[in-house]
Amino acid sequence: MSGDGIRLLTPEGERVPHPDYPFDPAPEELRALYRDMALARRVDAEGVTLQRQGELGLWPSLLGQEAAQVGSVRALREGDRVFPSYREHAVALGRGVDPLALMRLFRGVDHGAWDPDAHDFHLYTLVIGSQTLHATGYACGMAKDGADAAVIAYFGDGATSQGDVSEAFNFAAVWDAPIVFFCQNNQWAISEPNERQTRVPLHQRAQGFGFPGVRVDGNDVLAVQAVTRAALDHARSGRGPFLIEAFTYRMGAHTTSDDPSRYRDAAEVESWRAKDPLLRLERLLRREGAADDAFFAEVAVAGEALAARVREGVRAMASPAPEEMFDHVYAEAHAGVDRERAAFAAYQASFAEEG
Ligand SMILES: Cc1ncc(C[n+]2csc(CCOP(=O)(O)OP(=O)(O)O)c2C)c(N)n1
Ligand SMILES: [Mg+2]
């Protein structure tokens, strides 16, 4: 184990066996992991570009976190329930959410954009850490229903400084909730470095709440999948929550509204570039003869086709009528919302009369 956590694959693409987490996927599974990571990276790059072109309002890039996301989502079984934050694009794709749904959200033409029940993948949550409480409550409900399933809640290193996350840890622990807390420690919370979030490695925090926590090399897709699978088994079997700290790095800006060159060294980014999650799997695939140039070229072509579909789809998106923003505030009619809708309609009409 390195300081980066439990590891099954070195940055040079060499396997390292681990006694507690044996995992030896077949060559086609390894290729599928690579493909998922590469396609997610391509969709993500398109999100950044479309924002720069004025087609999206904002885009939070997942660049660098592909292994943490693809490895963990591939460990899930059907019926397991995901509570994401806002950067989990590869997890969304892994749950069958169309990339255009993600784009609808960040273009601001939809408040939710996908059906959580259809994908067992909840809506993105921008209020930092709050989804860990929703997820814990959901997990308790699943346990009461006797479901043979678990919940996984994604959040960042910065989110661990929110009271909500500590409350979720404690509540989940005392109720043995079937939940995996999946913290992507990407070293930064906007401009705040990890050392301003915690004095102890984040995975150790679980111990104080009475459940296990481990650090996994978040840029090693094999280790992430193996560790997440074990953590989900732990949760499903009634042994309570599990914390995974996926040690990774946010290679890009916090969002397209951020300029990280203002607060972090280029040398730090370079040191993480050497640990790139796609590169290390590519090295393994080539080393073991499980993929050749033709495979990587085919994945690149598929990525371009997907990006073209996303680009065309985004440009074709119609803007909703402004008053639609009142439609889904409550499930049922609400007098306060009705009043605000009427006032807004009168305001809009005042411009029309002037014209
Ligand atoms: C409750 C709350 N406080 C502050 C913010 C502003 N905010 C947005 S992202 C962010 C940093 C989150 O960092 P981290 O949890 O590490 O996730 P990352 O963005 O690195 O994936 C903050 C403080 C917010 N959205 N919600
Ligand atoms: Mg972070």
Image: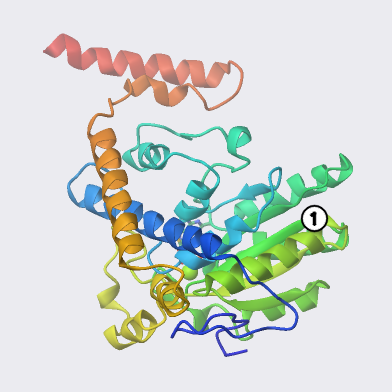
Q: How many labels does the image show?
A: 1
At 51% from the left edge and 46% from the top edge, which residue is drawn? 124
As drawn, 241 above or below 328: below
Residue at which label 1 appears: 178
Depth check: give the residue in front, 282 or 326.
Answer: 282
As drawn, 34 above or below 325: below
The picture places residue 223, in percent across and down from the top left corner, at: 60, 74
Depth check: give the residue in front, 255 or 48.
Answer: 48
The picture places residue 170, in percent across and down from the top left corner, at: 79, 64
Kindly state the secondary structure of the residue where label 1 is placed: loop
At 26% from the left edge and 50% from the top edge, which residue is drawn? 304
Q: In this view, does 308 lie to the left or right of 59?
A: left
The picture places residue 292, in percent across and down from the top left corner, at: 36, 68
At 78% from the left edge and 63% from the top edge, which residue is drawn? 241
Q: In which quarter of the image is residue 18?
A: bottom right
Q: Is residue 215 left or right of residue 86?
A: right
Colour mapping: rainbow
Q: In this view, does 6 lie to the left or right of 247?
A: right
As drawn, 103 above or below 200: above
Q: Quadrant of the N terminus?
A: bottom right
Q: In this view, does 204 lie to the left or right of 4?
A: right
The residue sitting at the front extreme is 289
Q: In which quarter of the image is residue 201?
A: bottom right
- Residue 309 visible to the viewer: yes
Q: Which amino acid type is shown beneath numbered disc 1?
A: Pro
Q: Quadrant of the C terminus?
A: top left
The residue sitting at the left extreme is 355
Q: In which quarter of the image is residue 178?
A: bottom right
The picture places residue 311, in percent across and down from the top left corner, at: 25, 41
- Residue 59 visible to the viewer: no
